[in-house]
Amino acid sequence: MLTNEDNQLLTQTDAGTPMGELFRRYWIPALQTHELESDGKPQRVKLLGEDLVAFRDTEGKVGLIDERCPHRGTSLYYGINDGCGLRCMYHGWKFNTEGECTEIPSEPTDGKFRESIKIKSYPTKEVSGIIWTYMGPEGSEPDFPEFYWVGLPDENKLVERVWQECNYAQAMENDLDYVHAAFLHKAHGNQETEEGILSSDLGIDPNHPLVKNPPVKQSVQDTNYGKRCVAVGIGTEEENAFMEIHYIFPFYTYPPRFGGEDGMWHAFIPRDDHSTWTWDVQFAHNRAIDVQAQHDRRGLKLDENLKKQVNKENEYNQDRNLQKTGNFTGIRGIANQDHAATEAMGTIVDRTNERLGTSDLPVIHMRRILLKEVKEFQKGKEPLKLENQSLKNLYSEGLYDDNKKRWQDAFPLKEEFEKEKVLEKR
Ligand code: FES
Ligand SMILES: [Fe+2]
């Protein structure tokens, strides 16, 4: 349960809000490389409540600029992208990727007026098929976060961006919630799945340790990237299943995986306070990823704006017969199941009214660190720094071991991720 003030602090991310300003101090995935062609159609992308337009110029450079033309405010999305700039359709003002005004056809040739016009623009970086941006103050950019999967070959990865119709915090809380997998994602029978793949479109196999029984114990550790959440579930008669989730401050996660299963990384980027760009990177460690099987498993069908065709309006195509015979929800596609549960909470869940139990421990810890860091940030503390030597080696794992072992012995935190390792260096 949170106070109303803390719920607002947690969920509001427009420019000028404390969390919004903190989030602007981290690298944000904005859109995929393939979404922009040189001199091709610009794309609208709303981030942290800001209406922006992205375009790729004649030389291949990416611009991420204010959608509103500074002349009289029409949308630059409809503009003409050619000759190294985006030209407004209304009166022809033209802007380059840096947001500088390069032409005003209707004004005298004296460039003083033109030179005084500068549109908001954010720096971008293209890494691993994703265009990332930094929306914070100039000169405060953190190092680019070199996540483990960034270093994998392209054919080992599958990247998806989807418009989720709820606030980022509740979308992200779902990733730190072990117990939901045993219900929301439970398939009633064993599933035919490809090698390395956790679940089918119906859900997770009832014998998978995530689903077999809700975890008997959960713990959360402080780390130099955020939080490591460990769950102990029942594996076999002699063995427990030890599973981890990583929460990387402030909006990235690695959901639980077992050895041999394809990995997964998420980012929850506020589109505005009522919607989220949910990024999903599936990755296979040592082979090409099975793109079709992963798409089928997640079940998302997106329109050209990356909104879901299976959504609240059509009640996620819930099939009540399937709910009796096939899976717990009657909803097909594991991502659709997640989206249904989190969107049905309302776009910003009222956390003053919830009743958290012991199984919500990781969610409580995530909120606690976000609120603690944002309150300290308001008082002038620098944002938590992510260390690339940690990020490079970090992903979720899971294993079976003797059920008499303590989780700290069976599945200890690797020394390189200990919080003190970074604190010492500060
Ligand atoms: S509104 Fe864009 S050029 Fe006039
Ligand atoms: Fe889920």
Image: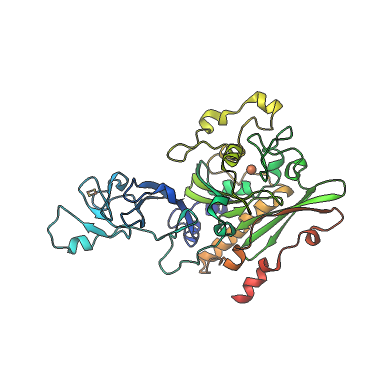
Residue 291 to residue 418: above or below: above
> Which residue is at 61% across, 60% downward?
369
Direction left: furthest residue:
108
Q: Indicate the position of residue 122 as horizontal and vertical percent values.
A: 38, 59
Please state if 187 lies on the left or on the right of 166 as rendered.
right
Indicate the quadrant where residue 325 lies.
top right
The answer to whether any part of residue 286 appears in the image is yes
Compare residues 66 and 300 and report the one nearer the observer.
Answer: 300
Quarter of the image with the C terminus is bottom right
Q: How does the figure colour the protein chain or chains?
A: rainbow
Direction bottom: furthest residue:
425
Q: Indicate the position of residue 201 as horizontal and vertical percent values.
A: 63, 35
Q: Indicate the position of residue 416 as horizontal and vertical percent values.
A: 67, 68
Please state if 417 lies on the left or on the right of 274 as rendered.
right
> Which residue is at 46% across, 41% downward?
306
Direction top: furthest residue:
321
Indicate the quadrant where residue 108 lies.
bottom left
Q: Indicate the position of residue 209 as horizontal and vertical percent values.
A: 76, 45
> Which residue is at 42% across, 69% downward?
139
Compare residues 364 and 57 and report the one nearer the observer.
Answer: 57
